[in-house]
Image: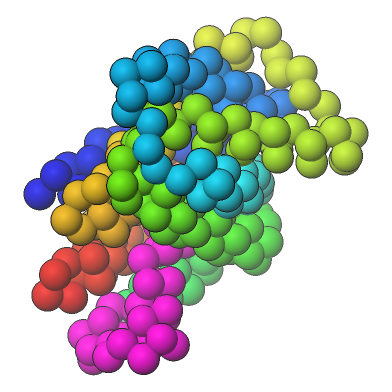
Amino acid sequence: MIAITLGLVAALAWGAHDVCVRYVSQNNGIFASLVWVLGFGLLLATPVSAVAWQQGAGGGSLPLALLSGLFFALGGVALYKAFSIGPVRLVAPVIGAYPILSVGWASVSGTPVTALQWGMVGVIVGGIALLSQSDPEDGGSGGGGAAILWSVLAGVGFAATFAVGHAATANGGELALLAPTRAMALAAVLAVALALRAPLRPERRHLPLLALMGALDAVALGSVIGAGRTDRPEFAAVGASTFGVITIVLAALFLGEKLKPRQWLVVLAIFAAIGVLGSPEG
């Protein structure tokens, strides 16, 4: 399925991006990292959008694309904050569990929710609770409670980003709306940073890494939003939610955040449950 494929492309890109977030946000601060990542991504997206407009492939809803950008800004700030204060093994599953929102919305709107779906929600929530508990020999996870709150906020922001973004591109304009979406996200984050008088100058040695992160982020968001005209665009968002698996594996390999066998089992159970929620039979 095209939507799932696009979602997995996004998962690979965001998985690599989020491991870098852990490093740059702790060394440069949230806004000095995110503003530059969004800026570099916008530089890449602008020519693509410009060509799409010139070729008459505009279409779509610009107001909805801008609204999607606002939600993306919210999700981005929360994600960077969560990764700066909490371990990857905790933050990634919480953010990646945003498909739960679709189940809750279905229940509120009167759509029947199966026992299997509620069971998977229970697996995800229970797994997150287990991962959030520090092992005595680890010396505490540091900021676990706050990290969970920021991670939940990030998940809400990204869920709204994808829902509104898919609505914006339901009738076309996937490429044309890439730049406006990112421009709105950048403007919103920059406005908050200026209001808070947050530092915006990263270390020069980190600029190449921030540029790479901007490219990865642009590819990921473009892949998910680009699924707007597929048969089941929501599957792209669900596929993208598996970015956490990649993030956790890379963090274990390169950041020294080792997982014990039982923690690996919990992580696998969480993402298996996410996959079931997003499956047609789920």
Residue at x 60% of width, y 12% of height: 207
In front: 70, or 274? 70
Residue at x 36% of width, y 45% of height: 169
Q: Examine the image and state in which quarter residue 9 appears.
A: top left
Residue 234, percent across and down?
A: 29, 59
Q: Examine the image and state in which quarter residue 105 appears.
A: bottom left
In front: 69, or 245? 69
Residue 63, percent across and down?
A: 55, 47
Residue 167, percent across and down?
A: 39, 55
Q: How many marks?
A: 0
Residue at x 70% of width, y 33% of height: 187
Compared across the picture, whether 231 is left or right of 18 comes to left
Residue 259 visible in the displayed image: no
- Residue 212 in the image: above or below residue 28: above
- Residue 133 in the image: above or below residue 163: below
Residue 28 visible in the displayed image: yes
Residue at x 52% of width, y 68% of height: 133
Which quadrant is the C terminus positioned in? bottom left
**Magenta span dominant secondary structure:** helix
Compared across the picture, whether 87 is left or right of 14 comes to right
Highlighted range, magenta = 92-121
Q: Is residue 105 highlighted in magenta?
A: yes
Residue farthest toward the front in the current orientation of the protein: 56
Compared across the picture, whether 62 is left or right of 171 comes to right
Colour basis = rainbow
Q: Is residue 21 highlighted in magenta?
A: no
In front: 275, or 93? 275
Residue 239, percent across and down?
A: 26, 52
Compared across the picture, whether 136 is left or right of 168 comes to right
- Residue 76 in the image: above or below residue 175: below
- Residue 235 in the image: above or below residue 36: below
